[in-house]
Image (cartoon, rainbow, N blue to C red):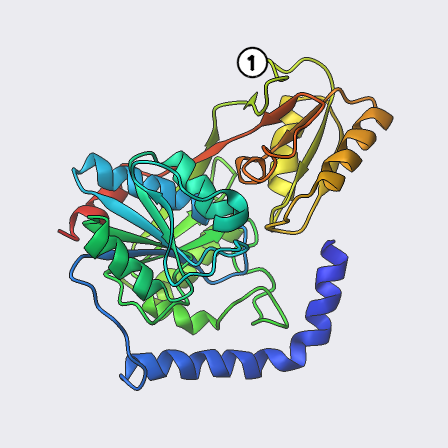
Amino acid sequence: MRLARDTLFGIGRPLGPLYGGLMSLRAAAYRRGWLRRERLRIPVVSVGNLTMGGTGKTPMVVQVVRLLQAMGRQPAVVSRGYGGQARAPVNVVSDGKQILLDAVMAGDEPRLLAESLPGVAVVTGARRAVAARFASDRLGAEVIVLDDGFQHLALHRDLDLVLFKGPEFLGNGRVFPGGDLRESFSALGRASAFVLNDAAPQLSSAGEGFCQRLTAVFPGRPIFRAFFRSGGLQPGNALAATNVIGPCLGFCGLARPEGFRQVLSELVELKGFVTFADHHPYVAGDLTGLVRQAERQGAGALVTTAKDLVKLRELGCPLPLYVLPVELTLPDEFSPLLADLF
């Protein structure tokens, strides 16, 4: 998979400067008022990234929402709804009282956010300014948390959080289609703060160097370290007991599956590991193939992520199915950043 991606980046490298230039022109058009940018009457917090996928945006959104709730605020989450079939201008995944759309209609991440955040409205829409205004005017939101919003410039944000995942941080450092970056490095000038997710207990030398670069180019912007934490494997269907006994087959549809595989290998006897494309829309045949592979490799159970599980429940699994949910832990110094919004 890595080799194929590097090959595609190599082919696309000549077009990277053109794409980066177009993104810079677009950002300048919003900055100078040539393109309209809507401002809401309530604060907007954006959680996004510069690189393509896999930085932990969904766990970060969950943590930001919970911190806002702890401050006595009523947040709502607004997402594009990538992969979902709902096409209305505003799609209410959850109104804060009940979940209204499944993963097929809502998209896997909005559905997961709705399940992870009871009492919080989750809405999707291609024009997120429209969806955010609906959450504010109709659903009683006091603050909007914009999922994957760094490149969505049509909505003004009061706090722009940009996430990076170690150990790569910037990937190959080139702009798509020649690399991992959605925009050029200079676009980080729009960011309010940076959040680094690095699995190592101590920040790696690459991480230290990256922090120094951020500080040198964007002085005064706070940099926070975040850590993934797992509560252990949990039952994902009725056949699963609370404890996993015996070998398992792991699988997921993530942009960067390597970290999940590493964690699983430390928790269970992993007989095999299957990867699908990010946001993969599972069908019955996928599950049949996974069960057959598990049987061939001597695995008596399947293990996946919470993001994948929301798309699997309706398919029915003849083997015990387990899920490994993860949460993001932020330092205490992060909360004042949110408190300053009010």
Is residue 166 visible in the rendered image? The answer is no
The residue lying toward the viewer, choosing from 202 and 23, is 23
Q: Amino acid at mark 1?
A: Thr
Left or right: residue 269 versus residue 159 is right
Question: Where does the image place residue 122, in percent across and percent down from the top left?
Answer: 35, 47
158 to the left or right of 274: left
Q: Nearer the viewer, residue 114 or 168?
A: 114
Q: Where is residue 204 drawn, in percent x and y?
A: 51, 45
At a point 49% along the width and 42% down the height, the residue shown is 102
Who's the residue at 35% across and 84% down the image?
Answer: 29
Question: Of all residues shown, which one is farthest toward the left?
Answer: 342
> Residue 98: x percent and y percent?
35, 36
Instruction: Decide: is 123 above or below 87.
Output: above
Residue at the far bottom in the pictured view: 34
- Left or right side of 221 for 49: right
Instruction: Locate residue 277 relative to residue 143 in the image: left or right.
Output: right
Q: Nearer the viewer, residue 92 or 282?
A: 92
Check the image and report above or below for 177 versus 72: below
User: Residue, x 69% and y 32% (percent of image)?
Assistant: 250
Farthest right residue?
A: 296
User: Would you identify the image quadrant in which residue 24 lies?
Assistant: bottom left
- Local SS, label 1: loop
Can see residue 156? yes
The count of marks equals: 1
Above/below status of 11 relative to 304: below
Query: What residue is pinned by disc 1?
Result: 242
- Name the residue nearer the viewer: 25 or 41: 41
Residue 262 in which image quadrant: top right
Question: For mark 1, does the 10 Å Cα neighbourhood hold few (<14), some (14 to 19), or many (20 or more) residues?
Answer: few
Q: Position of residue 55 (x, y in %)?
A: 50, 50
